Image: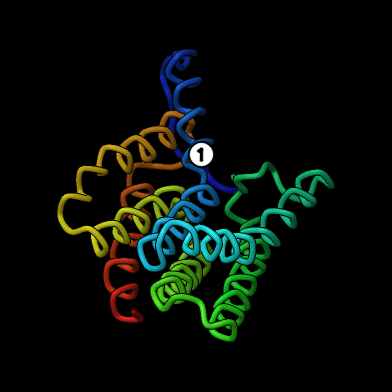
Amino acid sequence: MSAPTNSPTAPPDPTRVRVARVVTETTAPAILAVAGLLVVAIHSAGSGAGAAWGGFAALLVTGIPLAYVAKGVKAGKWSDHHIAERTQRAVPLLIASASVAVAAVLLVLVNAPRDLIALVLAQLAGLVVVLVVSHWWKISIHTAVAGGFLGTLVVLFGPWALLGLPVLAAVAWSRIVLDAHTWAQVIAGGAMGALVAGTLFPLFR
């Protein structure tokens, strides 16, 4: 079992919790991963072809992991679709890593845009880091993916993309309010995601 992340001294404010839950769900890792793939594909290949490439990559990257987690939640294997228990993370993360690795190979075989392949490889690296760290510590996957998304935007569009920092901060805040992580875990996740995307995505391009 994971240790409690916070010890609130007063009942949480219902409005704050509702807002935090909306932020958490609308910035879920799968959603931001898909958004990143679409942005990179459209930036690389244009709106029409790019959307098609991005959609294809998103299906490969997220389809199997999401279906696997949904099935596990329904069967009672996982606590919820966010895998709140750290000790339950290993298998879903291994499935996700394998799915992303297969996606990278298939995208190479079908001659997908190079930037799209580079992003998928960076996503794979981020997943591996999260998998390893999660063996000992509940690093935030939400902020890791949000940080990776922001790092990707900075590579593509330059410093102006840093205007998206409030979104990353909102994701971190939501995870704290929902008592899903400590501040150290959300900060580490965001920093790791941004670092991996900011270094490996341009390296693989």
Classify 27 as above or below 125. above
Pick whichever, 127 or 53, lies toward us.
53
Classify 97 as above or below 84. below
Residue at mark 1: 4
Q: Position of residue 98 (x, y in %)?
A: 63, 74
The residue depicted at 22 percent of the width and 50 percent of the height is 161
Outermost left residue: 159
Q: Quadrant of the C terminus?
A: bottom left
The residue depicted at 50 percent of the width and 64 percent of the height is 49
> Is 48 displayed left or right of 84 in the figure?
left
Q: Residues within 10 Å of mark 1 (few under 14, many from 20)?
A: few
Determine the secondary structure under disc 1.
loop
Q: Amino acid at mark 1?
A: Pro
Outermost bottom residue: 109
> Is 141 displayed left or right of 97 in the figure?
left
Count the labels in the image: 1
**Quadrant of residue 199 in the image?**
bottom left
